Image (cartoon, helix red, strand yellow):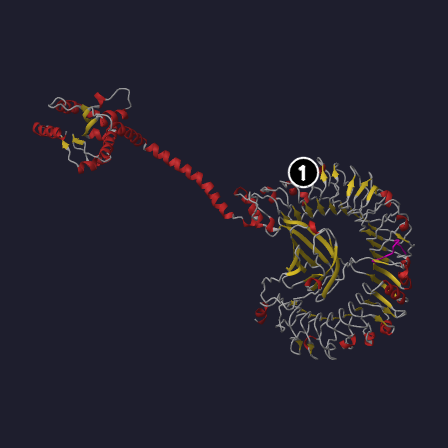
């Protein structure tokens, strides 16, 4: 619980055996920790004083970092609970006093760092019982001498004494007595001390592993005296000169380095800012026995070269050379590694370097080199050459077989150097593992350029040009290739076969091209591919079959900065991207193509909206079809009604203009014609006043559709409608139709113009079959025909009245 | 005269961020030059501490003369500097105009005194600086600088604003 409570304040707290970070949160106490904690970084907090109960009991704690905790006091038993610490860092604490018991309790201590603590003398540390101490770093304090306490002789594993940036101005012969007695290879770091004097002989017969004296001697004269005073020293690695870019110091006396000849050293690092007015110097004179020389900014244009006795590595940076010193380097037969780099002015390469049987490594990058006829003519005397770096130069022209005879080459680096050659052949480089021709402005025109490079693991050819179908066979022989970079080449497509033989290819970088499709990656030959960069291409979508056939081991897939089509038609692709978020690199830059300058990430795309649209897209047409079908069925079924509604509508319009030609339209079945003609027509048309009847057999216009006649002549042309209901009437479809039209008309006109005559009794069930008739009979008065004179008399009278 | 004093105030300990876990700290804007023709100011964008930058002389005019000034940068190391890499972006009104990436410290070749320094050490780095062609400066220039170490940890982060009149 306590731990979780504190976790809020802590930068990170990992309660495991190995690590526990409590950095920079201004804590003034040490919170509860796992008792097995081995590593505690408590830097940048506020402890003020280390007292006995500050640390919980942490018997396994090995690393304790208390950098800048504003510690001023350390109580005698402060480290009791953490007594097995092996590394203690107290950098940047203004410790006022360290008592005799303070650090001596830490018997297991191997490394003690007390940088910038205001320390005045190593004696003040009271560390005489720390027999296991290996490294003491008391840099950036106020030590005035490098006097070392004599008990350090007993520290059998002691290796490193770091005294950088103190105030040591003078080194007396006495100061080094203990160092001499220790008598083994320790490292002494004295850089950035303002030394003005070293007693001559102070380092006589002292053996050191490494001595760092950079930025130590305050002037050229002091350097001269002090180097002389260092004579007799035997050191594995000496570092002298300066840091960084300083103003150059002009000196007339270039023999100030003469003292180096009295020092026995194997390796030297020298950053030199001194210059002679003529440029002549003897920089290398005393380095004749060195095995490794690193010279930074040393002017070597007019230097006196020497025949090194056992040189293995030579590093010359910023040496202001005009030529590669081929003649001078020839016959340096022990040389294995040569670097000449960072020359400000263009360097020429005229002469051959000869007799360099062991040379394996040449780096002549960043020299603005302009070279014609490369390379076997130049390097033919280096049979063991494995590594050749000529990158960041101006221009190199290859011969037809540029590396003939240089069969040991394993690494070739020409990046950002313009390579001028139409056609070259590297077939002999069976051991070549690394080839970098990035941004070399090569125009690849023939497809067998990498023929025979069966051991190549890394090929980088971005920023070049390719013509024609060079990819058909270009990579056929590269069976062991693991990393291939062809970015920024403006390539718009690859053939499916292009990468088919690259069985071991793991990384493929194709960014910055104009690819639109990536079908080629489905080639089963690319089974080992785990990392693919397709960023900054023109890929808008990838087909589903390609996605399903991607190499099985793909763990990183970069699709950033492609104009991805985020429409619902590509929802399969977008869905794939979303479900493969673990392998998609650069999530935030996988963007949808939009017309606006602000693109939105594909991962923000709302796929659900597509589901709705999809459903709509499927359901929409189906419902329309169903609706049309239903309507058709309905229309077919009720075509009759539709038709007469139509007609009715037309008739209604016409009727408003025309006068009625008949008094009554008689709806009757043909089978009742006898009664109609004999009784109805006789009594009404021939009576007084005569009533003009409209009878379909007599009055309908010939040639007109029946329905039109019914409407125009019958219903519209008559003021009233007489319906003769009988058994036949019920059975006749036309009669029913006419009656229904009449009813509709009634509704439209709004007055009771239908007169019903029941000619004979009809069963109620049958009456109900005729739409509206039963209802009409119930609601309205009707006439009933009876075949006897009295009844018929009354019938006619009522009928006439109804007119 | 503040710009002549080469006086660097490190406000690191005085301006401790509060104990919030994600609290953004806005460090004060420090003025390097405040002349009629030229104003230079900077602000730390390191969430954990401020940085001290000063120059000992400010150009009074923008005429073609070159002037040599001394630049001093002071900061407290919160991580070691076995390797250091600088990345600077020159930002004009339209966006990033130029990006500079430069290794400052590499394992074999520590170019500067602040290379190979350990956590907790205080760096005070002095270097001569040549101010040249000031009149070709754009009117408003921002330089965003980030320095990271071998572990990608931000050793320093600051924005410099240069306003020419």
Spot occupied by residue A770 in the image (x, y as percentages of width and height): 23, 34
Q: Is residue B154 visible?
A: no
State which quadrant residue A673 falls in: top left
Spot occupied by residue A337 in the image (x, y as percentages of width and height): 84, 53
State which quadrant residue A291 falls in: bottom right
Q: Tell whether position A520 is magenta.
A: no
In the image, is A38 to the left or to the right of A669?
Answer: right
Magenta extent: A272-281
| Subunit bearing disc 1 | A
Which one is nearer the viewer's eye here, A82 or A6? Answer: A6
Outermost top residue:
A702
In the image, is A256 to the left or to the right of A61?
Answer: right
Q: Secondary structure at mark 1?
A: loop
Please tell me whether residue A465 is drawn above or below residue B160 in the rendered image.
Answer: above
Tell me what residue is drawn at x 64 percent, y 64 percent.
Answer: B48
Which one is nearer the viewer's eye here, B63 or A542? Answer: B63
Which one is nearer the viewer's eye here, A16 or A488? Answer: A488
Q: Is residue A167 visible?
A: yes
Outermost left residue:
A790
Mostly what secondary structure, the magenta segment? loop
């Amino acid at each position: 619980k306590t731990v979780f409570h504190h976790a809020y304040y802590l930068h990170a707290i990992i309660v495991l055996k190995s690590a526990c970070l409590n950095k920079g949160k201004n804590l003034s106490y040490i919170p509860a920790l796992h008792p097995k904690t081995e590593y505690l970084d408590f830097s940048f907090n506020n402890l003020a004083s280390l007292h006995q109960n500050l640390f919980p009991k942490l018997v396994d704690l090995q690393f304790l970092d208390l950098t800048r905790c504003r510690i001023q006091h350390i109580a005698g038993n402060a480290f009791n609970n953490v007594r097995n610490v092996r590394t203690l860092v107290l950098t940047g604490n203004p410790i006022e006093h360290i008592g005799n018991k303070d650090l001596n309790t830490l018997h297991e201590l191997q490394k003690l760092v007390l940088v910038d603590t205001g320390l005045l003398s190593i004696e003040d540390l009271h560390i005489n019982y720390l027999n296991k101490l290996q490294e003491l770093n008391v840099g950036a304090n106020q030590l005035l001498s490098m006097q070392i306490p004599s008990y350090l002789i007993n520290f059998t594993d002691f290796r490193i004494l770091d005294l950088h940036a103190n105030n040591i101005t003078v080194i007396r012969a006495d100061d080094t007595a203990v160092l001499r007695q220790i008598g083994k290879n320790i490292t002494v770091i004295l850089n950035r001390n303002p030394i003005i004097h070293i007693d001559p002989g102070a380092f006589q017969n002292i053996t050191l592993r490494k001595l760092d004296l950079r930025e130590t001697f305050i002037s050229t004269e002091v350097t001269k005296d002090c180097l002389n005073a260092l004579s007799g020293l035997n050191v594995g690695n000496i570092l002298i000169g300066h840091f960084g870019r300083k103003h150059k110091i002009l000196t007339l006396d270039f023999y100030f380095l003469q003292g180096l000849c009295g020092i026995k050293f194997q390796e030297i690092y020298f950053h030199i800012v001194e210059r002679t007015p003529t440029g002549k110097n003897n920089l290398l004179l005393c380095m004749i026995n060195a095995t490794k020389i690193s010279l930074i900014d040393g002017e070597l244009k007019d230097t006196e070269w020497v025949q090194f006795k056992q040189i293995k590595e030579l590093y010359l940076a910023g040496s202001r050379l005009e030529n590669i010193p081929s003649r001078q380097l020839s016959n340096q037969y022990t040389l294995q590694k040569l670097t000449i780099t960072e020359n400000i002015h263009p360097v020429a390469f005229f002469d051959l370097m000869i007799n360099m049987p062991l040379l394996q490594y040449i780096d002549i990058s960043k020299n603005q080199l302009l070279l014609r006829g490369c390379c076997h003519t130049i390097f033919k005397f280096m049979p063991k050459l494995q590594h050749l770096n000529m990158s960041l130069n101006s221009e190199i022209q290859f011969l037809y077989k540029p590396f003939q005879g240089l069969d040991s080459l394993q690494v070739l680096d020409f990046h950002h150097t313009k390579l001028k050659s139409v056609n070259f052949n590297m077939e002999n480089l069976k051991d070549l593992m690394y080839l970098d021709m990035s941004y070399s402005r090569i125009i690849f025109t023939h497809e067998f350029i990498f023929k025979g490079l069966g051991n190549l693991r890394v090929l980088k050819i971005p920023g070049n040009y390719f013509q024609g179908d060079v990819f058909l066979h270009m990579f056929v022989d590269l069976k062991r290739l693991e990393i291939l970079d062809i970015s920024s080449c403006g390539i718009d497509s690859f053939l499916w076969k292009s990468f088919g033989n690259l069985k071991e290819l793991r990384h493929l970088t194709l960014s910055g091209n104009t690819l639109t499709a990536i079908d080629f990656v489905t080639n089963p030959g690319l089974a080992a591919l785990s990392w693919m960069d397709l960023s900054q291409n023109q890929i808008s979508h990838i087909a589903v079959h390609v996605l399903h056939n991607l190499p099985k081991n793909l763990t990183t897939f970069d699709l950033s900065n492609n104009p991805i089509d985020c429409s619902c038609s590509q929802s399969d692709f977008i869905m794939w991207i979303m479900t493969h978020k673990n392998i998609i690199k650069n999530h935030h830059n996988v963007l949808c193509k939009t017309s606006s300058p602000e693109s939105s990430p594909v991962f923000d795309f709302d796929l659900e909206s597509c589901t709705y649209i999809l459903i709509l897209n499927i359901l929409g047409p189906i419902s329309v079809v169903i609706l049309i079908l239903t309507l058709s069925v309905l229309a077919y079924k009720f075509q009759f009604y539709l038709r007469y509604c139509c007609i009715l509508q037309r008739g209604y319009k016409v009727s408003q203009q025309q006068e009625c030609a008949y008094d009554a339209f008689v709806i009757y079945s043909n089978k009742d014609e006898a009664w109609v003609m004999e009784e109805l027509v006789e009594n009404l048309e021939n009576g007084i006043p005569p009533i003009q009847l409209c009878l379909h057999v007599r009055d309908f216009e010939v040639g007109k559709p029946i329905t039109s006649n019914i409407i125009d002549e019958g219903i519209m042309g008559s003021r009233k409608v007489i319906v003769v209901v009988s058994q036949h009437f019920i059975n006749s479809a036309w009669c029913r139709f006419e009656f229904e039209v009449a009813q509709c008309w009634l509704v439209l006109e709004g007055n009771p113009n239908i007169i019903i005559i029941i000619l004979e009794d009809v069963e109620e069930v049958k009456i109900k079959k005729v739409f509206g008739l039963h209802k009409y009979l119930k609601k309205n008065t009707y006439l009933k025909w009876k075949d006897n004179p009295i009844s018929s008399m009354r019938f006619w009278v009522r009928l006439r009245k109804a007119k | 005269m503040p710009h002549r004093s080469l006086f660097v105030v490190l406000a690191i300990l005085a301006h401790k961020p509060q104990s919030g876990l994600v609290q953004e700290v806005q460090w004060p804007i420090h003025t390097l030059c405040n002349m009629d023709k030229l104003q230079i100011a900077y602000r730390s964008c390191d969430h954990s501490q401020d940085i001290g930058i000063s120059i000992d002389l400010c150009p009074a005019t923008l005429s073609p003369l070159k002037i040599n000034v001394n630049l001093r940068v002071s900061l407290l190391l919160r991580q070691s500097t076995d390797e250091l890499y600088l990345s600077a972006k020159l930002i004009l009104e339209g966006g990033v105009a130029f990006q500079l990436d430069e290794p400052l410290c590499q394992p074999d070749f520590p170019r500067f005194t602040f290379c190979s320094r350990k956590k907790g050490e205080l760096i005070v780095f002095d270097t001569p600086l040549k101010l040249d062609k000031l009149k070709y400066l754009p009117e408003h220039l921002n330089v965003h600088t980030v320095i990271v170490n071998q572990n990608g940890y931000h050793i320093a982060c600051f924005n410099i604003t240069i306003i020419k009149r």
